[in-house]
Every structure is written in C-alpha cells, then in structure tokens.
Image (cartoon, rainbow, N blue to C red):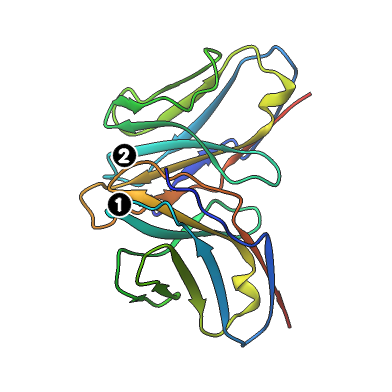
Amino acid sequence: DAKTTQPNSMESNEEEPVHLPCNHSTISGTDYIHWYRQLPSQGPEYVIHGLTSNVNNRMASLAIAEDRKSSTLILHRATLRDAAVYYCIPRAGYSTLTFGKGTMLLVSP
Amino acid sequence: GAGVSQTPSNKVTEKGKYVELRCDPISGHTALYWYRQSLGQGPEFLIYFQGTGAADDSGLPNDRFFAVRPEGSVSTLKIQRTERGDSAVYLCASSHPLSGANVLTFGAGSRLTVL
C-alpha cells in the first residue's frame, strides 16, 4: 500500500474554502486516490475519488498533482457539519481500504 | 434497508466472555467488510467477504476472532475469550463491486468495552 502523509489537524472558519493536502509519493500508476471522511460518532463516508484528472462532485473537488504524488481535497464553503476526520487513501482497483490517521478538520462559526 | 445496520450499538462485557456483533448490509451488496477502530486511530481492516466466502481475512489479529456470512447477507463477527485490548469500535461496511468505484458504505459501528 502507498504511504500517505496528511496534517494531523487543520482549522477553518465557516463559509471559507478549505484545502486539505495529502502526500502519496509512493503511489502506483494504477491506484485511484480516494477520500473518505468520518464525522463524530459515525462510520466513515465516501467523499470523492480520482485517478489523474481533477474531479468535482456535490460534496467537494479533488485536485491531483500532475506527477500524482500529492492531491488536495477542496471544500468550497466549509460548514459546521464538515467538521470531521478526512482520510486520503490510495487504492488499487477493488482492494480493501487502508486508513491512516487522517486530518481532523475543525470549523469555527 | 437504506443503510448498513449494526447491532448492538454498545456492548459492555467482562474479560474472558464471548461476544457477537452483527452487521446487516445494504440489500444487494455482495461485498462486506469488517474494520475496528481504536480511539484516535483510523479504522483497521479485519476481514472482507465476497458473497458467503471470506476473500481476505489477513487483518484478523488472532484465532479468537472469527466472522461468518452464511447466506451472503448478514454477517456476524465473533470474539472469543475477550481481552481488554479488544475494546474498540467495530465497523462494518458493504459495497457493490460492479458499481463504479466500489464505494464502501459504513455503518455507525458497535462500540465494544471489555472490563
């Protein structure tokens, strides 16, 4: 499994954009980059995934570096409900997800 | 059901006792996963079922842990001779491998406390 490095925590104010970075320098060429988040007292939930191109969905955007050694999850306008632990997970095909410690996002009103 | 259901939500037991945790996946999801999560850590993979069979049980920590999925739907995680170190939140997830990115949908977990 590719090793990932994420900040332990980040802070944001409500309604501001948030950029959550992830380094995955040992990622293989066919690994997708998945992001999941875990709200307090809940199981993780899927956020977004991508391979090479930047991706957008209703929850977030994913910007992937050209060399694929890093990616950034972008929340365009943080809300209090976005306070969670965000996990960046390189994943080969349908292999199991391997979670690291993730980044705890704190959102202030 | 609409989501992954796990029961019980909380279980307190004494050291040495036997425990069963149940997972009811989303209808039609053929893949089922068990993870456990200790405080301050990310979820740790335990076992993965495809249908009725365990496709990957490499994460089970020792032979006290066992999981079954006899009819390819509901799964039970069984822990024998519980130890205090088994205290954690046990998470279940299911997915439909043929649907796009094989997104995992997790339940809320079963919190196990071993006294």
- Look at label 2 and name its amino acid: Ala
- Look at label 1 and name its amino acid: Asn
Report x, y in % for residue B90: 57, 36
User: Alpha-carbon neighbours of circle 1 within 10 Å: few (<14), some, or many (≥20)?
Assistant: some
Q: Residue at x 74, y 23 (%)?
A: B84
Report x, y in % for residue A51: 30, 63
- SS class of the residue under badge 1? loop
Whether residue A32 sits left or right of residue A80 in the image: it is left
Q: Evaluate if marks 2 and 1 touch, with contact meaning CB atoms under 8 Å apart.
A: yes
Examine the rendering and report whether any part of residue B11 can be seen: no
Q: Residue at x 33, y 51 (%)?
A: A28
In the depicted structure, whether residue B76 falls above or below residue A99: above
Q: Residue at x 62, y 15 (%)?
A: B18
In the depicted structure, whether residue B112 falls above or below residue B115: below
Q: Residue at x 37, y 44 (%)?
A: B94
Nearest the eye: B97 or B70: B97
Nearest the eye: B62 or B34: B62
Residue B31: image tag: 2
Whether residue B68 sits left or right of residue A106 in the image: it is left
Report x, y in % for residue B88: 66, 35
- SS class of the residue under badge 2? strand
Give the chain letter at badge 2: B
Residue located farthest toward the right when viewing the structure as drawn: B115
In the depicted structure, whether residue A85 falls above or below residue B70: below
Residue B102: image tag: 1
In whole angstroms, how far apart are the C-alphas of marks 2 and 1?
9 Å
